[in-house]
Amino acid sequence: MSQSTTTDVSTIPPVNHDEAIELAEAEYRRFLDLLRDLGPDDWGRPTDCDRWDVRAVTLHVLGAMDANASVRELLHQQRLGGKAGKEIGGSTLDGVNEVQIRERASLSGDELVRRYEATVDRAVRGRRRFPRPLRGVKLTMPPPWTGKRSLGWLNDVVYTRDTWMHRVDLSRATGRDLVLTPEHDGRIIADVVADWARLHGQPFELVLAGPAGGRFRSGTGGEHHELDAIEFCRSIAGRRERTGLLTTEVPF
């Protein structure tokens, strides 16, 4: 995404299935590179995610990858997620996340990295082959999101956004450099901007700084925001204070 050219968000193409798998594999491997760089003292550091330290975030990401790799595991997590969500006072999605962490809690840091590395190819293959009959199934999104989204969209887009945002979380928590490129991270962020624009439906101008940023607009006379591209994503993911259109949250 060009840093000097202003992009009308209506011209941003959606991420198709083939591109989604390329982005997913690249993101999994960037996350793995970060995990390999962690030391023993890093696993217990708090993150921007409530109740989750670095280890819990990674357990969640691994659990999601296991679900990507196996429809049976996906259904298992969904079955237990409703009960777990009630136990912690959250949604079924919260419960699924809880199940992912609980069932992998015995893994040490080193074991976790090895399990993650061994799961990457299976998760990518599972997402590439996600059954066509399931792709069109619609799910009602839990608050703060609204409306329905297809399982195909969740498989292609949201799992990668989730891993990407958690890489941001781990980088911030451990002080490690966050690897960003226009081709990979810039594409993910542009798709996020387009989704955000559709959700609020208002005119805006948005200037995002950094290697994964860009300039975006929709209509005329709307709000104007200038901030770092990562801080924009943290804003609309509910990870920092925000105002105006930045209070519109996007699924990550």
Image (tube, helix red, strand yellow):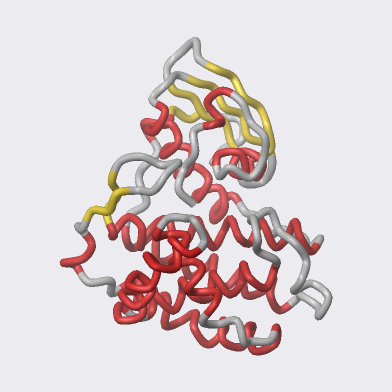
Question: What residue is at 49 percent from the left and 66 percent from the top?
Answer: 97
Question: What residue is at 39 percent from the left and 68 percent from the top?
Answer: 83
Residue 166 versus residue 37 in the image, above or below: above
Quadrant, the N terminus: top right
Query: Does residue 114 appear to the left or right of 142 in the view shown?
Result: right
Tell me where residue 144 appears, x and y as whole percent: 45, 41
Query: Does residue 35 appear to the left or right of 69 in the view shown?
Result: right
Tell me where residue 114 appears, x and y as whole percent: 61, 88
How many labels sit on residues? 0
- Residue with the most extreme top position: 221
Query: Does residue 145 appear to the left or right of 190 in the view shown?
Result: left
- Residue with the most extreme left position: 133
Residue 4 versus residue 123 in the image, above or below: above
Residue 12 versus residue 40 in the image, above or below: above
Question: What residue is at 35 percent from the left and 48 percent from the top?
Answer: 141
Question: What residue is at 50 percent from the left and 49 percent from the top?
Answer: 187
Query: Does residue 50 appear to the left or right of 38 in the view shown?
Result: left
Depth check: give the residue in front, 170 or 25: 170
The answer to which image quadrant residue 58 occupies is: bottom right
Residue 223 versus residue 170 in the image, above or below: above
The answer to which image quadrant residue 151 occupies is: bottom left
